[in-house]
Image (cartoon, rainbow, N blue to C red):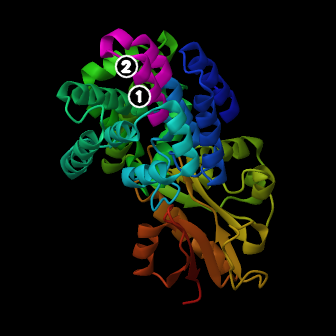
Amino acid sequence: MFPNTYALRDEIQRLADSEGLNKPCFKEMLEYTVQLFETQGLGSDYYGYHNIDHELEVTYITLLAASKSREKFGITQKDLEYLYTASLFHDFDPQKSVDKPHEDSVIKFISLDKNLKNLLDQSQLDIELITVLILRTTYPWSGKLKEYAEGKIKDCFKRSEITKNDEQIQEHFMTLGWFLSIVDRVSGYALGDFAKAMEMAKKNAHALAWHPSVVTQRSVAYFEELLNKEGDICQSVLCSLPNSMRKNFMNAVLSFMKSREKEIKIKSEFVFGNINLVSVADSMNMRNNSDFLRMLFSIYNELPKPLQLARIGFTDSITTDKTILCTLRINGDNGKIIGFAKGGPLESYKLRSEIEDENYLKQNTVFLEPIAIKMGYWGLGAGTKLRDHFYLQAKENDYQFLTSYGLRDVIRDRISKEDAEFVIMFDPEHWDYYRVNLTS
């Protein structure tokens, strides 16, 4: 819906002004948020879900929904200021150990940052109540996470001069926090089509180190919980949004459910023996076929953006004889292509700046790009089949080592089965660079 971060920022500013949030401090908060996220590497290109775009989407939908829900939720002008400020900073955790922000780290930041403290003083907002709203966005709101957040919230209410002796106002701020937590979970899906929704889900899965086979399943569970357990307030938030945004959200829900149904059908066909996966080393003649190239690129596009390491020049790389390529097909060498493994000389790739590979320039190492498989076919042993075939081709090409990126837990499991080792670990991604000795 918005072409870039700055277009979204400008629309938030316009909406904030129209809703009476026209003190200079509120504009400065918005600018400061964008600056903070981008300088901390949490801009639009950040690998995970909780980047600047998510923060601004939540702020935009908060203003939009709150402006239409004043009577429903008893939202005053001051409440709107609290919601705006809390939404802007609710996920800012610059010292991430994982992508999912830790509320304690967020609160520590807003408590200690001098620039933000100055802006809050100008806004005359109580930091204790901003903290309450942020704590209420804790997800899931159950079990030990809920108990811990509730304990912190009680302490905030006791410290705030506004709420310490007023249970009614405390309950009101808990409702505002609940409202914000719902907005937090629906905003991104309301602001785009299913392609955007799927990209969000994939980035979230990558950041949380989920196997691709569970992305759709967990997305369906996420929506079912939201619509069933918190249906009334979720419906109230959605009804406060324009019809096009409500349609976007519900289309995402229905599309994930349809995708899950398709996955189950594929898995049942595999169990019944109607689907057999075959890995193929395609000829150079095939690799120059335009339909073949288009098919591979469409599958490549299904990878999360952070895993598309060689998007520029993709077609040219397929057609060079230095590239090792294995495709995965259904029921035979000429069957439908549903995945591929691709790689080439380590020296052909630009690695992360932190990596110093001892074998670089020795021409003895092949780099395996992230394996690409169509959604629905993960979890059938497809990745293992492709990787094993790629290893075999790499050995035939006299490579001594293979390097790649992989999820930390997957690499650990591989070390127990292969002559593999971590070269460098990356936090908070847990998406690490490893090496396999092909000569052992």
Of residues 436 and 38, the one nearer the viewer is 38
Q: Main secondary structure of the magenta part?
A: helix
Q: Is residue 391 left or right of residue 202?
A: right
Q: Residue at x 42, y 59 (%)?
A: 381
Residue 190 rendering spot, x and y as whole percentages = 48, 24
Q: Secondary structure at mark 2?
A: helix
Among the two numbered marks 2 and 1 on one chain, the one whose residue lies closer to the N terminus = 1
Q: Secondary structure at mark 1?
A: helix
Q: Position of residue 438 (x, y in %)?
A: 58, 83
Give the percent coordinates (x, y) of residue 435: 58, 79
Label 1, residues with CA under 10 Å away: few <14, some 14-19, many ≥20:
many
Task: Tell me if 168 is positioned left or right of 46 in this view.
Answer: left
Q: Outermost residue, front direction?
A: 161
Which of the image's four quarters has the N terminus?
top right
Q: Are the two marked residues, 2 and 1, in contact with CB atoms closer than 8 angstroms?
A: yes
Task: State the residue at coordinates (66%, 35%).
Answer: 5
Q: Which residue is mark 1?
A: 183
The residue beneath circle 2 is 237
Q: Give the answer, above or below, for where 195 lies relative to 269.
A: above
Image quarter in which the C terminus is found: bottom right
Residue closer to the observer: 266 or 20 = 20
Q: Check disc 1 and give the amino acid type.
A: Val
Total marks shown come to: 2
* Identity of the residue drawn at 70% across and 68% down: 351
Q: Where residue 371 appears, x then y in whole percent?
A: 57, 58
**Residue range corresponding to the magenta coloring:** 62-86
Disc ID at residue 346? none
Q: Amino acid at mark 2?
A: Val
